[in-house]
Amino acid sequence: MTNMKRRTFLKGSVAAGAVGAAMGAGLLTPRIVLAAWPTAAFEAKSVDSALDALAGSHALEGSDKISIRAPDIAENGAVVPVSISSDIPGIESMSIIAEKNANPLTASFTLGKGAEGFVSTRIKMGKTSSVIAVVKAGGKLYSTGKEVKVTIGGCGG
C-alpha cells in the first residue's frame, strides 16, 4: 500500500515538474496569447500587403546571411519542406512566403531572445513560385529567395 502512494506521488511530481518546466521555457502559454496571431497577414492576397500586416513595412533588403533550403522540384505541392537559417544578430522573427500562392504568407515564427536563427517546416504551394525567406532583425526586414517548381503528380508538368 505504501509503494502505491509513493508511485502516485512520484508520477504526480514528475508531471508537475514537466509542466512547470514547459511553462517556464515558454512552450505552454495561455490560449489568449495564442489567439493573437496576425490574421490580416495570413489572409493577405499579395506579398506587400502580407508584409505590411505582419511587420508594418514591405521594404525588403536582400541578404547573403540568410540560407533557404527547399527542393528545386516539389513533386507534391501540398508538403514542400522548407528550412531557413540565418546568423544575422538580434533576429526577432522569420517568415516564409510563397509568392504566387493565393495567400502568400505560409508561415511566420517569432523567436525569443537568444534563440538560434533556424526554422524548418512544410508549406503548401499551389504552383511554381519563388519561396521567400524573410528575417526581421533590428526592426529591418532581410530576405532571400529560391524558385521551387511544383510538378503535377511528379511528372515535371
Image: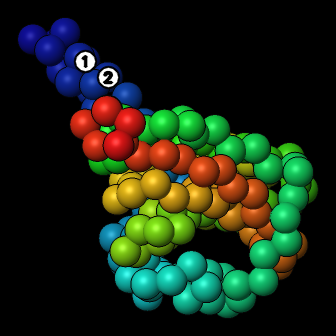
**Foreground disc of the pair 1, 2:** 2
The picture quadrant where one finds residue 49 is: bottom right
Indicate the position of residue 57 as horizontal and vertical percent values: 71, 88
Foreground of the two, 15 or 25: 25
Indicate the position of residue 128 as horizontal and vertical percent values: 46, 54
Is residue 13 shown above or below 83? above
Tag shown at residue 66: none
State left or right for residue 111 relative to residue 14: right
Foreground of the two, 37 or 123: 123
State left or right for residue 145 relative to residue 43: right
Foreground of the two, 102 or 54: 102
Indicate the position of residue 4 as horizontal and vertical percent values: 14, 15
Q: For the C terminus, which image quadrant?
A: top left
Is residue 139 shown above or below 105? below
Mark 1 touches mark 2? (CB < 8 Å): yes
Q: For the N terminus, which image quadrant?
A: top left
Badge 2 density bin: few <14, some 14–19, many ≥20, Cα 10 Å:
few
- The three-letter amino acid code for the residue at tag 1 is Arg
Q: Which residue is mark 1?
A: 6
Which type of secondary structure does the marked residue at label 2 adopt?
Answer: helix
| Residue in view at x 67 percent, y 90 percent | 56
Q: Which residue is mark 2?
A: 10
| Residue in view at x 58 percent, y 58 percent | 130
Badge 1 density bin: few <14, some 14–19, many ≥20, Cα 10 Å:
few
Residue 68 appears in the figure: yes
The picture quadrant where one finds residue 142 is: bottom right
State left or right for residue 29 relative to residue 118: left
| Residue in view at x 38 percent, y 36 percent | 156
| Residue in view at x 19 percent, y 9 percent | 3
Residue furthest left as drawn? 1
Which type of secondary structure does the marked residue at label 1 adopt?
Answer: helix
